[in-house]
Amino acid sequence: MKNVNLIVLGVVILVLFSGCTSTTSNKENTISGKVIFYDNSIPIANADIYIYANDKYTCTSEYWYSHKIETNSEGEYTFMYSTENRYKLYSELKSGLITTHYSQFVYVDTSEELIPIVAEDIALYEKSENSNINLNFESNITGVDTDSIKVILSKLEGTNLVKIDSFVTTDEVSYLIENVATGHYYVNIEKTTFVPEENAIVTLHNIYGLSFIDGINAMETTIFLDYAMDEKPAIYIYPEKAEKFRVSLLFKEGVNLVKSIPSYNAGWEIFVDVNGKIENKYDYLFYECLQPTNFKFQNGYCYSSEGIDSEIDQLLRKIGLNDIEIEDFIDYWSGRFNNYDYYKIYPIFNNEIDNYVELDIDPKPDSILRVWLYFEGCNNYEELSKPTFNQFKRNKITAVEWGGVMIN
C-alpha cells in the first residue's frame, strides 16, 4: 500500500510539474518566424538575420543594431525580446563571402506581457542589378540652390553601409544611377553654404533612407536640401552653493551652432549663484543650432491650436519643469501655432538629444533633465501613441534644458 501511495504521489507531482512548465513556456518572451524565398515561399536554412531594436517609450524611430542570428535547417528562428523595445529584422543569404539574396525590413511590435510572438515571414529577393534610381534635388532654403551638394549613395551590407557611388551636383536637378542591385540604399548629402536667413555659413547634412530596391524596377525620389532650427535651448543650473561651472556642447555631424548668449566660443566658463543667476546677469544659457530634418517619430500628442499653450503647460509639468521654466518656454513659443488647426508634439529626452548635441557640465549635476519638443502642424486631429516617461526629480546640483523645433 505504501508503494502505491508513493506512485500516486509521484504521478500527482509529475502532473503539477508538467502544468507549471507548460504555463511558464507559454509566457516566454520570444519572437519567432521563418525566412522564405519571396517567389515560392520555400523556407531557407542558414540565412543571417540582423536584429535592430528601438526603445518603444521614446518618440524617435531610431533603431540600433542588437545582434545577429541564423535560421535553422527548417528556415526558422527564435530569439528572446525585451518588452521595453520594438524590433525590425533584416535578412541576407550568402554563398561563401558573396551575398546572393536580400530582404526588406520586417517590423515587430512587442507585447507588454511575456508571450511568444510569431512575426510575419521574412522574404528574400534574389540579387539582380537591373534597377535604376533617379534622384531629384530641391532646396527648401531661401537663397540656397542645389549646386555643389556632395552626394554619396551607400548600400546596406550586413550592418555596414558600403559606398556605391558619389558625385557633386551642378546646375542639374535630376541624376540617374543605373545598374542598381537588390537591397537597401541610403543617400548622404552635404553642402557648406551661406544661409541668408541665418546670416551664417553652415554645413547642411542629411541622410535619406530609400525604399527597398528589388533589383528590377526603377525608383524615383526627391532629396530636399533643408534644415530645422532648434530654437532657444535654455540651460538652467541650480547649484547648492555659488560656484564656477564649465559647460560644453558637442555638436554631432550635420548640427551647427548659429547663436549663443553669452558667447559660447569653445565653451562657457561661468559663475552661478545659489539662486541660479549666471554671471549676475543671465537666468539661463542660450544657444540655437541647425540640425538635419530626417525626423521619424513614434510617440507624441496631438492638440488643437486653440488652447495649445495650456496643453503645453500641463505636459511640461508632467515632465518635471518648474513654474519659471514653463513660463519661459510658453513666453517664447506662444503665438507660434497659428498656421494649422492642430499640432502634433513629440518630446525627446536626454539620450535622444545626445544624438544631436551632447551636454557636459563640470562639476557634474546630480540630476539633469534635457527635453526638446518637436512641433508638427496638421489640419486634422490624429490619434498618436502616447510616450511613457518618469517625472523628473530634482536632487542637489540640478541642470534643466528645454528647447523646441518647428518642423513645418
Image (cartoon, rainbow, N blue to C red):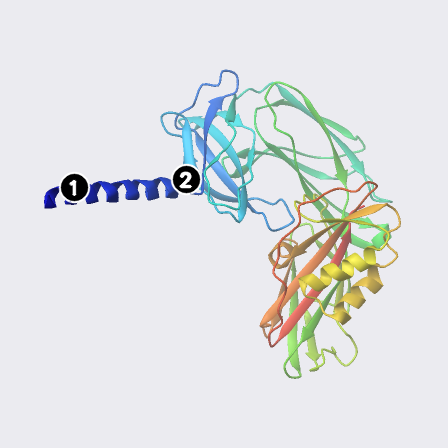
Rendered image quadrant of residue 23: top left
Question: Relative to 160, is 315 on the left or the right?
Answer: right
Earlier in the chain: of badge 2 and badge 1, it is: 1
Return the mark for residue 141: none
> Up-down: is 312 above or below 10?
below
Q: Which residue is mark 2?
A: 26
Residue drawn at the location 61% of the way across and 25% of the way down: 213
> Up-down: is 110 above or below 230?
above
Q: Amino acid at mark 1?
A: Ile
Could you classify mark 1 by the number of other residues whose Cα lies within 10 Å: few (under 14), some (14-19), or many (20 or more)? Answer: few
Pick the quarter of the image with the N terminus: top left
Q: Is residue 263 visible?
A: no
Proximity of marks 2 and 1: CB atoms separated by less than 8 Å: no
Q: Position of residue 298 (x, y in %)?
A: 65, 45
Pick the quarter of the image with the C terminus: top right
Q: Is residue 214 visible?
A: yes
Q: Secondary structure at mark 1?
A: helix
Q: Amino acid at mark 2?
A: Asn
Give me the C-alpha separation between circle 2 and circle 1: 29 Å
Q: Quick one: 246 or 384, which is closer to the camera?
A: 384
Q: Quick one: 57 or 38, which is closer to the camera?
A: 57
Q: Position of residue 92 (x, y in %)?
A: 48, 29
Return the mark for residue 7: 1
Q: Position of residue 232 (x, y in %)?
A: 78, 61
Which label lies toward us, 2 or 1?
1
Question: Relative to 281, is 76 on the left or the right?
Answer: left
Q: Position of residue 287 (x, y in %)?
A: 75, 63
Residue drawn at the location 76% of the way across and 70% of the way down: 323
Rendered image quadrant of residue 224: top right
